[in-house]
Image (cartoon, helix red, strand yellow):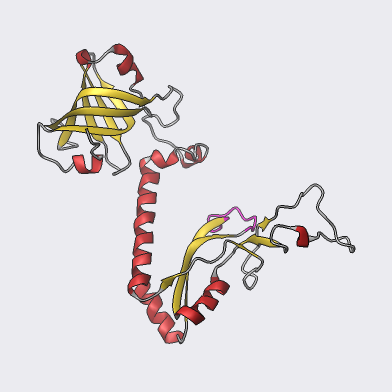
Amino acid sequence: MERTKVKDLLRREDYGADVTVKGWVRTKRGSKAVNFVALNDGSTIKNIQIVVDVDKFDEATLKDITTGACLSVDGVIVKSQGAEQSVEIQAKAIEILGRCGEDYPLQKKGHSMEFLREHANIRMRTNTFGAVFRIRHNMAIAIHTFFHEHGFVYWNSPLITASDCEGAGQMFQVTTLDLKNPPKTKEGDIDYSQDFFGAQTSLTVSGQLEGELAATALGAIYTFGPTFRAENSNTPRHLAEFWMIEPEMAFYDLKDLMDLEEEFI
């Protein structure tokens, strides 16, 4: 049976319909007779509740339904008896797609940001980071839509560059040379002519310079991509990597620029 996303299931009212849902277990609770499994597939921050009649499943399968495990569930849409959701799935068959050990870090409890930082590979499964990334996605779509509707061309500036872009910040160097034994010039300096690009290069701090050139050909462009700053400043206002929006327009004066900024915001 074709998989149905949790986002779509939560809007359905065709009780009695057979469905297949796949996702990861957020929580599991219940009694000797029935288990309730909160399943999430990433299509929404909300979970779908799976009702599991213990008598209909073998002990090994039930044991493998743990927080973090990945499941495929065939079942029937039924009206939920609980107040938190309008529909739930009465399980008919459960396949364990991926087991998860009892040491899985994201158990049903609060987690500090520092704890999640230590488990960055799975922190996006939490509601906090799930919400942040969904907001970021919608903001990015809105940004692209705004510039597209205003006649701007999306310009992809280089991430590796030999330019420091008007001294915009300390840069991360990129090289293929052997750092333990780099080639040297007669003067004793590092011979970057033997490097991959034949020159000293770094990660970009800005797409501005390439954007200015593009604007002289395409009229109005914007860059929207990752930039890198190597200042060793561990403050909330500093990021080593961030995405920056940089529009560049030909024939704009200060008033035109302010009008664009105000409309964009």
Q: Is residue 116 above or below residue 216?
A: above
The answer to which of 184 and 171 lies nearer the viewer is 184
Is residue 119 rendered magenta in the image? no
Q: Is residue 239 visible?
A: no
For the C terminus, give its image quadrant. bottom left
Pinpoint residue 220: horizontal percent, then vertical percent: 44, 78
Q: Is residue 165 visible?
A: yes
161 or 172, which lies in front? 161
Residue 233 is covered by the magenta coloring: yes
Which segment is the magenta one?
230-240
User: Looking at the picture, how far across and down is residue 248, in whole percent?
Assistant: 48, 76
**How many badges with numbers are in the image?**
0
Q: Main secondary structure of the magenta part?
A: loop
Quadrant of the image occupied by residue 185: bottom right
Q: Residue at position x 84%, y 61% from top?
A: 189
| Quadrant in the rendering for residue 258 | bottom left
Does residue 101 lie above or below 138 as drawn? above
Please provide percent x and percent y for residue 250.
47, 83
Out of 194 and 161, give the one closest to the viewer: 194
Query: Image check: 214 left or right of 256?
Result: right
Task: Examine the image and state in which quarter residue 145 appears.
Answer: bottom left
Q: Nearer the viewer, residue 160 or 81?
A: 160
Left or right, 13 with reference to 150 = left
Q: Quadrant of the N terminus?
A: top left
Q: What residue lies at 80% left-to-right and 52% top-to-bottom?
A: 182
The residue under the point 14% across, 41% down is 12
The percent coordinates of residue 109 (x first, y second) are: 38, 31
Left or right: 243 as drawn, with respect to 7: right
